[in-house]
Amino acid sequence: MADDDILTIKEVAEYLKLTERTLYRLVQDGQVPGFKVGNSWRFKRGDIERWIEDQKKRLQRPGGD
């Protein structure tokens, strides 16, 4: 799968093992990278993969919150 694949909120929620409602909240709060097309949220696969790696690094840092 390519980094520039576009995913729906349902696909990302399933991938991250979150409810769609939780993902909506995280995206609206700016915690997860996404963009709107009309009224629908969309996500680039590469952005989600990088976000996951960033989260892992943040948690591995001494004193990470």
Image: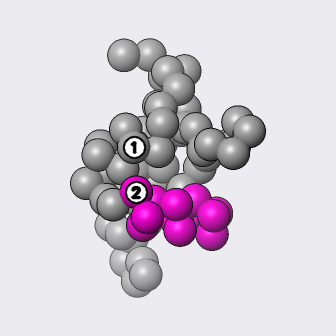
Q: Is residue 53 above or below residue 30?
A: above
Q: Around disc 1, counting alpha carbons within 10 Å, would you say few (fewer than 14), some (14 to 19), or many (20 or more)? A: some
Residue that extends furthest to the front in the rendered view of this protein: 39
Magenta part of the chain: 20-31
Report x, y in % for residue 65: 43, 81
Does residue 44 appear in this view? yes
Report x, y in % for residue 35: 67, 43
Helix, strand or loop under label 2? helix
Report x, y in % for residue 31: 56, 64
* Number of the label disc, if any, that sits on residue 20: 2
- Could you tell me if the residues under marks 1 and 2 are in contact, i.e. CB atoms within 8 Å? yes
The span from disc 1 to disc 2 (Cα, nearest Å) is 6 Å
Q: Provide the residue designation for mark 1.
A: 10
- The residue at 43%/64% (across/down) is 21
Report the quarter where the N terminus lies.
Answer: top left
Residue that extends furthest to the left in the rendered view of this protein: 17
